[in-house]
């Protein structure tokens, strides 16, 4: 989160239509050809807080000393953002891959609750992650050759009238993807540096102060363009009408 000095508020977000089905813990996504598993993640909380802030301020947060042009752009940008249910899942081409992540999560959840367990996790990360992590960390070659992909699957309504109909089901699906180089050692520093550059170069167009999520602060800025210029990709994969 981007931290200034203010009180955090989180109004209830009213989302049209029924909530998405809970589904199974592990399931196969035929469209992506991947096995997916629900993942408890701070990302879910951050997205919900962003949407809550947009609900509270439908035109976005005004900049401390923003230009009229940016103010108009900000209002136009946030008018296109609608509230949504959001959840995170981890994926793998095989169900065995999900099993490894599940075991790792269980070990961390159980052993991370007391000091001796944490010391075991730190001393033997390869053992308790079934080889997913190791104490020495990745080699430079492994970092250079790694990459990440995140799919965003959105299901909703083609118009607001349909969303307000009692018992109506989503009739539209959009799939997008964010990808880039190795996510921890390369992509994370890229994102942090570009956020810092936006803060330095566009401070007048950003909120005066507060405790905000990155989306609420950087949404209408040129951050996405900057990330694309530094190796990340934001793609629209497909749109389709649901039966």
Image (cartoon, rainbow, N blue to C red):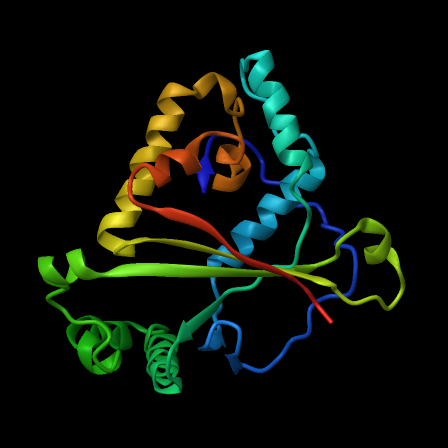
Q: Nearer the viewer, residue 29 or 107?
A: 29
Q: Position of residue 84 (x, y in %)?
A: 66, 54
Report which quarter residue 22 is drawn in.
bottom right
Q: Residue furthest right?
A: 166
Locate the N terminus and report the quarter of the image it occupies: top left
Q: Position of residue 240 (x, y in %)?
A: 64, 62
Q: Is residue 94 above or below residue 224?
A: below
Left or right of 54 on screen, residue 87:
left
Q: In this rendering, does residue 213 appear at all?
A: no
Q: Is residue 173 above or below residue 32?
A: above
Q: In this rendering, does residue 83 appear at all?
A: yes
Who's the residue at 38% across and 48% down the image? Answer: 233
Who's the residue at 60% across and 52% down the image? Answer: 48
Locate the C terminus and report the quarter of the image it occupies: bottom right
Who's the residue at 33% across and 27% down the image? Answer: 197
Who's the residue at 29% across and 39% down the image? Answer: 230
Q: Position of residue 94 (x, y in %)?
A: 37, 83
Q: How many marks?
A: 0
Q: Is residue 35 above or below residue 54?
A: below
Left or right of 106 on screen, residue 27:
right
Q: Position of residue 184 (x, y in %)?
A: 27, 55
Left or right of 184 on screen, residue 141:
left
């Amino acid at each position: 989160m981007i931290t200034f000095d203010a009180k955090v508020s989180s109004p209830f977000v009213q989302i049209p239509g029924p909530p998405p089905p809970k589904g199974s813990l592990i399931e196969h996504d035929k469209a992506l050809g991947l096995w997916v598993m629900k993942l408890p993640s701070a990302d879910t909380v951050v997205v919900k807080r962003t949407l809550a802030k947009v609900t509270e301020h439908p035109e976005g947060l005004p900049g401390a000393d923003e230009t009229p042009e940016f103010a108009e752009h900000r209002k136009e940008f946030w008018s296109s953002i609608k509230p949504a249910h959001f959840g995170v899942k981890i994926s793998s081409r095989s169900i065995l891959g999900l099993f490894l992540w599940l075991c790792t999560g269980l070990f961390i959840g159980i052993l991370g609750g007391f000091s001796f367990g944490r010391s075991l996790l730190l001393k033997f990360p390869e053992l308790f992650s079934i080889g997913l992590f190791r104490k020495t960390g990745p080699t430079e070659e492994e970092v250079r050759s790694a990459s990440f992909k995140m799919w965003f699957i959105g299901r909703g309504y083609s118009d607001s009238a349909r969303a307000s109909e009692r018992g109506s089901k989503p009739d539209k699906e959009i799939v997008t993807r964010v990808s880039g180089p190795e996510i921890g050692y390369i992509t994370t520093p890229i994102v942090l540096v570009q956020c810092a550059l936006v803060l330095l170069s566009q401070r007048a167009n950003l909120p005066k102060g507060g405790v905000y999520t990155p989306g609420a602060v950087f949404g209408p800025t040129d951050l996405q363009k900057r990330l694309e210029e530094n190796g990340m990709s934001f793609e629209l994969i497909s749109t389709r009408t649901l039966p």
